[in-house]
Amino acid sequence: MNVSRETSKRLQAYLELLKNWSAKINLVAPATIEDAWERHIEDSLQLLDLRPSPGPIWTDLGTGGGLPGLVIAMALPSQETETVLVESDQRKAAFLRHVIRTLEIQQTRVIAERIEVISGLGASTLTARALAPLPKLMTYVERHLGPSGTALLPKGRNWREEVAAAQLSWQFELTAHPSKTQPEAAVLEIRDIHAR
Ligand SMILES: C[S@@+](CC[C@H](N)C(=O)[O-])C[C@H]1O[C@@H](n2cnc3c(N)ncnc32)[C@H](O)[C@@H]1O
């Protein structure tokens, strides 16, 4: 996805903060820091291209150091959508809030609690990267996705096995999009979820 020059500058500033704080807390795998634009920024931005239509709430579960939720919040057209980041690790949540304040990211808030205990967020779009295998992730998605919402879930090369395992307990509509940044990986677009 192409972003404006202003957004690109903010994303670079975010990467600087990510690198600085990574010296103290484990925000992303150290080996990925040098290649962070492709491994993290482009990997996150590809989700925006898959967003079905603008909606009021974009929720990112298990945001960690900001991926993909904070990148989405910086790149979304302003004002139309609130971004809600859920991250239970208090130090990571403090980092997310620091970035939001420092880069003046609008319409974005952090919930520093566990996904399982907070009330359903009714997300119009829901993302979660590297949070849990799909069968477990589906319980989180079902809790926080609104009735007509869409989940966009980046998954590694074993995504077909994860889908088969999840289908034992869940019915859902699925479109698998090839990842633009990782060979054999996919972004799973999931909606209309029902427990079997
Ligand atoms: C492997 S990291 C991935 C972080 C980020 N999404 C990424 O792709 O770089 C998983 C994150 O989810 C958070 N997490 C795991 N289980 C959680 C839960 N039940 N509620 C809230 N956050 C959770 C962890 O603290 C961690 O930061």
Image (cartoon, rainbow, N blue to C red):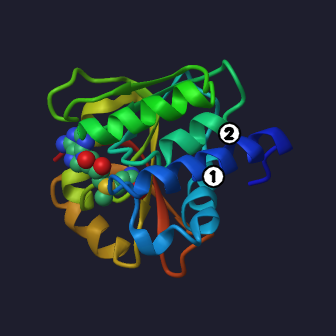
Secondary structure of the residue carrying numbered label 2: helix
**x then y, percent, for residue 12:** 68, 50
Q: Is residue 53 above or below residue 1?
A: above
Residue for point 52% across, 40% down: 70
Residue 98 seen in render? yes
> Badge 2: how crowded within 10 Å, few (<14), some, or many (20+)?
many
Of the numbered discs 1 and 2, the one sitting upstream in the chain is 1
- Quadrant in the picture for residue 26: bottom left
Q: 44 or 186: nearer the eye?
A: 44
- Quadrant in the picture for residue 153: bottom left
Q: Which mark is residue 6?
A: none
| Separation (CA) of disc 1 from disc 2 | 8 Å
Q: Is residue 193 left or right of residue 168?
A: right
**x then y, percent, for residue 141:** 30, 41
> Badge 1: how crowded within 10 Å, few (<14), some, or many (20+)?
many
Q: Which mark is residue 75?
A: 2
Q: Which amino acid lies under the numbered mark 2 shown in the image of this protein?
A: Ala
Residue tagged 1: 45
Number of numbered callouts drawn: 2
Q: 1 or 85: nearer the eye?
A: 85
Query: Which residue extends farthest right?
Result: 5
Q: 68 or 94: nearer the eye?
A: 94
Q: Tell me whether the residue at label 1 lies in contact with that at label 2, contact meaning CB atoms closer than 8 angstroms.
A: yes
Residue for point 25% across, 32% down: 143
Q: Which amino acid lies under the numbered mark 1 shown in the image of this protein?
A: Leu
Residue 124 seen in render? no
Q: Is residue 70 above or below residue 135?
A: above
**x then y, percent, for residue 27:** 38, 54
- Quadrant in the picture for residue 46: bottom right
Screen quadrant of the N terminus: bottom right
Residue for point 34% across, 77% down: 158
Secondary structure of the residue carrying numbered label 1: helix
